[in-house]
Image (spheres, helix red, strand yellow):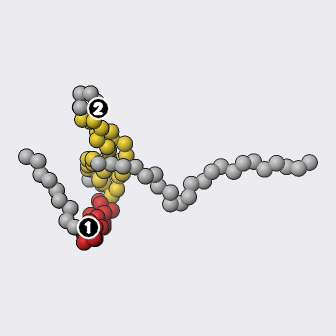
């Protein structure tokens, strides 16, 4: 009798993150860590009411948050060298 092999469960690759889009972020803090909650602005027709669909949260210890600032600054500086200054419009 030939033994049939059972199908193997799918395994995720070690580096296979989900990709999501966010144009809003809010922060929640504690003594131990920082949580960044990401979302996407939704405009609801026909009223045009604005709301944010909060969909992803990342919690990190404060040391990682500080390293994140460092690497974000490097990446923004490199982007601006290649593409020009990122202008931030202030609405009053």
> In the figure, residue 77 lies in which quadrant?
bottom left
Identified at 72% across, 48% down, the residue is 7
Residue 40 picture location, percent across and down = 31, 43
Identified at 24% across, 35% down, the residue is 50
Identified at 29% across, 48% down, the residue is 23
| Residue 41 shows up from this direction | yes
Q: Which residue is mark 2?
A: 44
Q: Nearer the viewer, residue 44 or 13?
A: 44
Q: Secondary structure at mark 2?
A: strand
| Residue 70 shows up from this direction | no
Q: Secondary structure at mark 1?
A: helix
Task: Name the side, left or right, on which 23 lies relative to 90.
Answer: right
Q: Nearer the viewer, residue 58 or 86?
A: 86
Q: Which numbered tag is attached to residue 83? A: 1
Q: Which numbered tag is attached to residue 10? A: none
Residue 39 picture location, percent across and down = 32, 44
Q: Nearer the viewer, residue 56 or 43?
A: 43
């Amino acid at each position: 009798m030939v033994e049939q092999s059972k199908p193997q469960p799918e395994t995720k690759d070690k580096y296979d993150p989900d990709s999501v889009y966010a144009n809003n972020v809010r922060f929640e803090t504690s003594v131990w860590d920082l949580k960044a909650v990401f979302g996407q602005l939704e405009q609801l027709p026909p009223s045009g009411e604005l709301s944010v669909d909060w969909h992803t949260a990342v919690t990190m210890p404060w040391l990682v948050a500080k390293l994140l600032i460092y690497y974000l600054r490097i990446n923004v500086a490199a982007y601006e060298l290649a593409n020009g200054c990122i202008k931030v419009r202030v609405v009053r």
